[in-house]
Each structure stands twice: as C-alpha cells, then as structure tokens.
Amino acid sequence: MSIYDSGVTTVAIASVDAGDVSSECDEVSVEEPLEIDLIDRQQGHPLVRSIAVTMRTPGHDIQLAAGFLFSEGIIRDADDIVEIHATSANIVQVTLKPTAQFDPARLDRHSFVSSSCGVCGKRSIAAVFALKHHELQPGFPKIQSEIVNGLPRAQRAAQANFRRTGGIHATALFDESGHLLSVYEDVGRHNALDKMIGAELLAGRLPLSNRLVLVSGRASFELIQKASLAGIPVLAAVGAPSSLAVSLARQSSMTLLGFVRDDRFNVYADAGRLTEAPAGLFARNVFGESTL
C-alpha cells in the first residue's frame, strides 16, 4: 500500500528497553506537503496560482482544500467553487467562479493568524470580524456537562490512526445530544479542523449552529477563528486555550471549553450555553472586557 492510501506508514526502529536493544518496526503518522492551487480562467486560458502549501496527513485532501479556502475568507460557500479536484497525490486545484474575488492579502498569515504575532491581537480579531461568515446565537444550543464529559471518549474510540501511531491530532463533530457525527485526523490541528469544515461546506451544512466540536491538543487563536467563521457555537479542547483564543471566543459569543478530560473541564467563554451554569457567572479576558 502506498503512503498516499493511508495516514499511516511503517518504519524500522531500534527499541531500547532496560538497556536491551532490538530491531523492530513501528507505525507512524504520514506527513506530506499539500499544494493548493487556484485556477484563473478569466483571461481566456487557465492561469495556475499556488496559494498555499500545508504539511498534512494524506486523506480528505479535497475537504482540506475547501475548508482552507473558506476559513481564509477566499470563498463564502460551496457555490463559489466551479471545480475542485486532485491533480496528483500532493496537489489540489480549485477553479472559482468569477464572482469569487480572490485577494492575496488575505493569505498574509503573519499579520492575520500566526501565533508568532505577539502584538497584533486586536488587529487580528478585527480581521476575523471583517471576514465574518456566520453569526453565533448566544445561549444556543443548551448543553449538559455530562454530554461534554463524554466527548473525549467518543472521539478517541473513533481515532483509528491515533490507536496505531499515538501521533496524530483529531477534530470531532457532535450534535447537541453528544452523538458523534464525524472525525477527521491529521498531524496538524488546523488541518483536521479544515477537513471537517470543508466536508460540511461541500455537503451544504454550514453554518454548524447546533453542533459541538472537540479538538485534540490546545485551543489556539487559529482554531477559534476557523470555528467562528463556520458558525460553530461550542468548541471544546482536550488541552488549554491561549489568551488570544479566549478573547476571540468571547467577542464571537462562542462557548470555549478547555482541559476537557477525566470528566471535568474549564469554561473560558460564554458559560450561558451550559444548563448547569449559575446566573451571573463571568470572567475577565486579557483585554479587560467582562463577559457573562
């Protein structure tokens, strides 16, 4: 089997156990570059423009490309896409409608979504709201804490590649009753979320206004940005959020949950969607705004 047929490949290793060394094989997650190209046919002949290269685990590349274009503000819905297809194992080409205006400045990730931008928090948040696709409805949906507590177990049970390698992230989509709808795995947290958003976009199911999403690892600003644009009201993370992620979630009216594991979790933004939240529960974010 080619590595392009699976997210897992086998490598030879030396195993050291209590000083004893042996030759073995181990399964690891595949990481390969994916190039996303836009095809411009407005000049009478196709002009190929490479807009991004992302390191990803092969699989669901069409969904990944669609989700990336959506979460970067290049498209607003699936109707903006005329054609999307893989031209090779590592290239996806997308033809957009002429009405879908492409602005290369939107891909300036150093000033928009990069975690290395340490002084541009408010500017980055303003850029997200300038691209806003779907507004969130405060207080909807209502969820119980026991449903949140069950999300990690359901996600882990569906992570086939994680069971084999222990080295891959996942994004899981649930309905408001905690029923698992889909799981996407990738070596990149943002890629796993883009795969899920792209799949829902192409299926015509955005906004995800009554859905819950669980991501493995920490909750970064970039993940909150993507979830906000897709209309996701509740994002839960196995790990911790960053300060800018908390601020964006609060300004987006998104419920942000962190450290969701071992039947406990923290609420960092909008506790109003939890049925058990006491009246008047509030927090203060890094920019000084108080939010219920």
Image: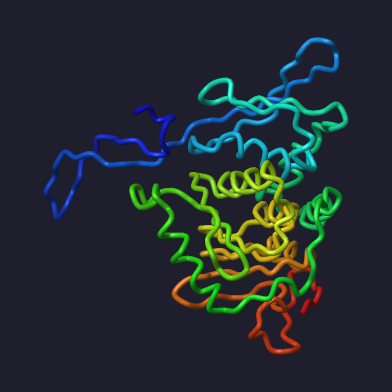
Query: Residue 219, position in %: x, y?
Result: 60, 60
Say above or below: 156 vs 149. Answer: above
Q: Quadrant of residue 75?
A: top right
Question: Does residue 17 appear to the left or right of 230 in the view shown?
Answer: left
Residue at the (72%, 79%) spot, across then down: 272
Say above or below: 2 vs 109. Answer: above
Point out the residue furthest to the bottom here: 279
Question: Does residue 281 appear to the left or right of 196 in the view shown?
Answer: right
Residue at the (80%, 77%) spot, across then down: 290
Query: Residue 70, position in %: x, y?
Result: 73, 42
Q: Quadrant of residue 95?
A: top right
Residue at the (63%, 56%) spot, across then down: 220
Name the foreground residue: 147 vs 19: 147
Name the foreground residue: 202 vs 115: 202
Image quarter where the C terminus lies is bottom right
Point out the residue furthest to the top here: 45
Residue at the (55%, 72%) spot, across then down: 148
Image quarter where the N terminus lies is top left
